[in-house]
Each structure stands twice: as C-alpha cells, then as structure tokens.
Amino acid sequence: MTRQIVENCINQSNSRFEFWVNFLNLIKAKNLAELGVYKGDFAAKLLKKCDSIEKYYMVDPWRQLDDWNKPANKEDNVFEKFLSQTKSKTDFASEKRIILRGKTTEVVDKITDGELDFAYIDGDHTLKGISIDLIRLFPKIKDGGWIGGDDFSKTVWQHSTKYEPTLVFPFAVYFAEAVDATIYALPNSQFLLAKDSKQSFNFIDLTGDYQDTGLKEQLNPDKILKVKNKEKFIFWRP
C-alpha cells in the first residue's frame, strides 16, 4: 500500500515540495513535526496546501551552534531574522503551529510519544545530527506513521571536504534496519521511513542510485584526494 502511494506521488510531482504535499494529502496527516525549519518555506507550503493538518510542531534552535560544521550555521542575528521570517510566513496558520525553539535533545520531549502521523527531518545532516534526530524522534511517531527527510545525499561530501560529512545516507538505512522498518529512497535526495509493527526491514530504492550502503568506497583516501583536487580546481580557477 505504502509503495503504491509513494510511486503515485513520485509520478505526479516535479519537486520535493510537490511530492510531500501529495503524500500528506493522500495519507491525511493531522499531527506533524518538522526538525530543521530554517526560514519556514517548507512549513508554509505544507500548512497552505494540506488541509488535514491540525498540529504542526516546528523544531529548530535558530541559533549558532559551536559544534555544527555546516554552511547553514549562521550568526545568531541571522537566525533571529530566519525565525521572524518563519513566523511571518506561517502566521496564517498560527492556531496550528507550535514553535519549539531548541535542539532536538532540548525540546523533543514536549511532543507526546506516538502523537505524530508524520515528521520531516531537515536538520544538521551530520552523523551526530541524524543519529540524534532519528533516535529521539522515532518514539514520537505512531504505529502506521512515517518519517521523511531531506539531504539523503549519495555523497558524504555534499558540502565539500572542509565541512563535516553528510551521513543521512546511509545512516537512515542502518537505523531502519535496527528498528525493523521499511525505508524508501526517493528522487530529489529524499527518504521515507514507514513505522509499522506488522512490517520488517526493507530498503526500497526507487531511484536506482543507492545500491552501496557502505562507506568504504566513499572514505577511500584516493577518492577523497580526487574530491579535494576537484574542489581546488572549481574554487580557484580564473
């Protein structure tokens, strides 16, 4: 059933936004959470186009983090502007939104276990970040609910080698196996994990791009050297 829904949504969508709107409308999700709200664009689109939504948790620190080596880590004053933009973009649905300002570990327990129909992870994408987000968020999803996510990147060097590697993939696959869940690889670097006590672990790659779930090849010193040399050429060519 889930696979058929997912494939139909893929065929009817031209972007990640369209996919998730179509998916959430089909499953008639009521209680949602988004981890990593940033400027509020994703939240605004879902709240505007998914009439079934009754409650939408927005989880984000909106502050500079000392231990987050990613390009989206801005100064505090910039994050204050992002929070203001988020509120402005979602004021039309103020009765549905619940803003939880803080890191996942600081605020996620304000969400009741088993409360959520769906959650979307678009956090810091490092191994530390995706581990914390999935482990702490999973109990908040009801049986029969889903977790979606962004930056299911085929390369760990998504943001160049000067930043911490992106490990949403393959960690999300490892996590799905650990909790005996089915996980789908989707177009536009998205993933969908189905929490269903009646199902067992299965990794369904609907893109054909994720056959190797190991890290040996990506962390091969020769491969890293090639990536670094390519970056040097791109960054420094006249």
Image: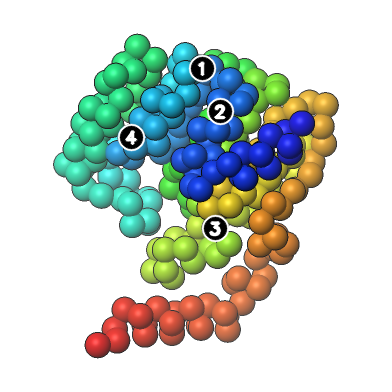
Provide the residue designation for mark 4.
Answer: 40
Q: Give SS at disc 1.
A: loop
Q: Observer-nearest residue: 46 or 128?
A: 46
Spatial separation of the CA atoms under disc 2 and disc 4: 18 Å
Mark 2 vs 1: CB contact within 8 A: yes
Spatial separation of the CA atoms under disc 4 and disc 3: 22 Å
Q: Residue 175: horizontal and vertical position, in percent?
A: 68, 43
Foreground tag (4 vs 1): 1
Provide the residue designation for mark 2.
Answer: 24
Question: Which quadrant is the N terminus positioned in?
Answer: top right
Name the residue rendered at 57%, 38% in the picture.
148
- Within 10 Å of disc 1 (Cα), the crowding (few <14, some 14-19, many 20+) is some
Name the amino acid, label 3.
Answer: Ser
2 or 1: tag closer to the N-terminus: 2
Q: Identify the mark at residue 153; answer none if there is no mark.
A: 3
Name the amino acid, label 2.
Answer: Leu
Q: Give SS at disc 4.
A: loop
